Each structure stands twice: as structure tokens, then as C-alpha cells.
Amino acid sequence: MEKSSSLKLFGSWASSYTHRVQLALKLKNIKFEYIEEDLSNKSEALLQFNPIYKKVPVLVHDDRPLAESVIILQYVDEVWNERPILPADPYERAVMRFWCHFADDKLGPAVGVVFASSGEVQNAAVDQVHENLALIERELREGYFKGRKFFGGDSIGLLDIVLGCGSYWLAVFEEVMTGVKLVDPEAFPLFHAWLREFEALDEVKETIPAVDKLLEYAKAVRAMLLGHCMGNTGVTDAATPATTAAPATATASVPDITVDSS
Amino acid sequence: MTSEGNEIKLIGAWPSPFVMRVRIALNLKKLGYEMLEETFKKSELLLKSNPVYKKMPVLIHDGKPICESMIIVEYIDETWTSDGASILPSDSYDRAIARFWTAYIDNKIPDAISKLRPMVRGSVEAEAEAEKLVATLQVIEEAFEKCSKGQSFFGGNNIGYLDIALGSCLAWIKALEKMVEIKILIKEKIPGLVSWSERFCAHDAVREVMPETDKMVEFAKVLLSVMATTPAN
């Protein structure tokens, strides 16, 4: 029976959470139908498939929907077990799950705040990002991941996918916000080296949008966010590439880059 | 009984729902372990074993630490496969659904508990916050109907991953009902969950690690006074 007989992925082109799933499906050579969502005008289908969070990515396999990227990745790995992305050993799995949790619980949100703020708030968030990266750097240098090319070993696995699809934003943000240094190769040499290896992979290059597209998008969102923070209203029309960034708080409204579109 | 060469230690504290999750999982697998009880001052071992979050629970299995309660539960399920029942569902889709609702619970319930804990009994504020928590539980009630498929627990005939995730919060929920004079486990609003909660608390693997409500209320008072005098850590 064709396992991918009905496999759909609802996503957004700039969403790192969507990229995670696209990358995993690509690594496993699984065919699927991709549906691009306009996050400022979400489809009925998306709202029906993910009523709780109303976010992308959503995977629909044989009409059964799943949300939350890390949950989707584990499901995909279990159903299509060619080219595994989780290790077999329970302890390794626990370590990978822990750092995936850390990435989405701590690192991602801190990066989101950096992007959505300025001044003192941004400085504090940059410090947070550095603290978080330092923890990962330590594991690479002398801890659990010592000596590994990728977190998954010789080839990329769950944690590489989770950290990697998201970390490319770091360089983009540094370009957009001059003076903000997020991944200094001197401070985080091993993390920096890993990220370069990750980005050099064919499957990754085919999944992540070109840097100039990301830059254009990031600049527009940053301008909109800062304009909004300074009290301007009416900037959130559908023509803006910014997506669900319209309402409320800075952290919650950063599109795709933090927990918002997971 | 632990199998030969298996040394299990658990860094935790009896009031913590996160620690309780691990203890229930260990009980389901009939595993013996050494409980290393934490006090308000964090032990060196905890700080060393969980340098990232500095929080309990931490499971130490043959000297190797595992952190994050539901990750520990999954680790226990994957490591001891022949002892006791399976904790996660066997079907991949059901497993994903269990993980989804567990994440939802962890997004909502611990925060709700923290918010309610210091509130004044019978206050408008407390009522409003309690209503929000009930609304969250109503969403979970729907999930319960779907997951249980008419059986006693989210996991079916026996308690599983999602039962553990939610059930561990019951000690605080019941304590808050008493302390803050609010109603959360309302039969008219969440009938399935109310019945489920009684079955959960009565379960062999749960009974001895679920603290009595009065004990929790007493602890809450101590906790609140400690929090009032100590800077956040």
C-alpha cells in the first residue's frame, strides 16, 4: 500500500517550522502535496485541521491532521522508517528530545524578542541568545555532542533539523539589524561550524529559501514591527509580507520565526 | 524490582506534579528507585545534573541524567519494554495526538496553577482565573472523549502518557479548589474528566504518590511564604 497515498503539508514559505517538516520529508524521499498558506488570511482547511493553534505546519495524512513541528517529525519518522532521523537508543532519543525542547522553549523565543524589539529590551534578549548558544556550544565542545560533525552524528537527525531550520535566521537578522551580533564565530566556533555544514547540504539548500528572499522578508517585518511598537496603526494590510504579526505583543507576533507558527 | 545493573535515582520533591509524573511511570513499570528529596534550596546534584534548567525532576539511570518530565516518561517507556504496561499508545497517530495534548496541557495548566495559588479566596480575580482553567479543561474534555473511545482513561483501559500528564496536575487543582474557594472540577461542565479524575487518583500506580489535598494546602502556604521572602530563582 502506498503510504503517501494522501499526504498534505500546510505551510508558509518563510516558516522555519514548515521547513523542518519539508526537510524531513525530503530526506526520506516522501511525496506530498504542499499547500502554501497566507497567514494573514488563513484557509478554512487550516482552521479546521488545527483549531487549537491555527498555525502552520499541519500535516494531513490520509485525512488525519497533525500539528506542532517536532510532533510531526517524530510521527513521520515512525511511519516512514527509511533514513531515520531519530536515533534508536532510548538515552540518545531523550537527549535529542531535550535539546529540541530547549530550542523551542528558550532559544527560539529569545531570538524572536531580539527581532521584535530594540534598545534595552533587545540588549537583554541578545544576552539571552548568547547564554543559550553557550549551553549548546559547551555540549559540542566538552559534553554529549563532543566530536560530532552533526548533532545526529555523521548525518543530520532530529536535532539538526530543529536547530538548523531556524538558525539560518540568525545571519539574516544580523544583516537586518546592524550592530547586533548573534552567532559570533569566535564566541561560538563549534556551533558556527555545525551551522555551515548544515547549510551546505543539498537537501537543506533545496528546502530553505534563498538568503535574499529571507532578507527582503525580514526587513519588511522588522520595519512593520518597529512601526507598530512606536504606535503606528494601520500597517497590517494583507499586502505586507508580515503575516500574523498584526496584533498584540512583540514576542507573540513575530511571524514564523519563534513559537508563533510552530 | 530493578533488573540487574539498573540503578535508578530520582531527584524530586513530593508536591511537584512533574516529579509525580515520573513516579507514576516508574510504578507502572514496577521499577524500584531511590528518591532524592529536594528542599527549597537546590542541591548540588540537581544543579550538576540539570545545568540548563536547574529544575526537577531529573532521573539518573546508571549515572546518566535525563531531564524534562514527559521526556523522562517516554525514556522509561522505551527502556523498560517488558515490564508492566506500555505507557505511550502503540499506534503512531495516537502517539502524536497524546504528545500534542500533553504539550497543550503544559502550555496552559502549570501557569494557571501558579496564577491561582496566591489569589485571595473567593475574589473576583480568582473566579475569573478559575473560569479560564475550566474552559481549558473543557477543551481537554473533548480530547478525552476522542482518545478514550469509551474506555476509562485517555490511554484506554489503563493509564498512559496523556493520563499521566494531566492527572499529575490534580493534586494542585484540588488544593486550589480548597485554598482559593473556587470550583474547577465541575461535573456539569467536564463530566468525563471528573469521573476520569476519580479513577486516575484511585489507580494503583498513582495512589501512593498523589498527595492528600490537605497536605498540599499546607505545603502551598509554606511555598507562598517562601516565595514572598526569596528572590525568584
Image: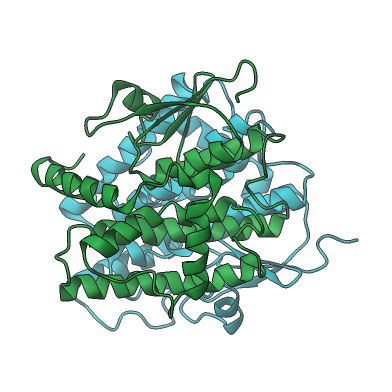
Residue drawn at (42%, 51%) of the image:
A172
- Left or right placement of residue B44 versus residue A206 in this view: left
The vertical placement of B17 against B56, above or below, is below
Residue at 38 percent across and 62 percent down: it is B108
Residue A203: where, in percent of width, then height? Answer: 68, 47
Percent x, y of residue A110: 33, 49
* Residue A69 visible here: no
Residue sitting at the far left: B229
Q: Is residue B56 above or below residue A24?
A: above
- Determine if residue A202 is in view: yes
Q: Quadrant of residue B54?
A: top left
Q: Which residue is more in the foreground, A124 or A197?
A: A124
Indicate the position of residue B104 as horizontal and vertical percent values: 47, 61
Q: Which chain is green?
A: B
Left or right: residue A54 versus residue B29 is left
Q: Nearer the viewer, residue A169 or B111?
A: B111
Q: Is residue B124 shown above or below A211?
A: below
Left or right: where does residue A8 sit relative to residue B216?
Answer: right
User: Which color scheme did the rendering employ for the protein?
Assistant: by chain
Residue shown at 64% from the left, 16% from the top: B4
Q: Residue at x 16, y 51 (%)?
A: A120
Q: Name the outermost residue toward the right.
A: A1
Q: Quadrant of the N terminus of chain A?
A: bottom right
Q: Nearer the viewer, residue B176 or A12?
A: B176
Most foreground residue, A165 or B223: B223
The tint chain A carries is cyan
Q: Is residue A192 left or right of residue B78?
A: left
Q: How many marks?
A: 0
Residue A184: horizontal and vertical position, in percent? 36, 34
The answer to whether B162 is drawn above or below residue B86 in the figure is below
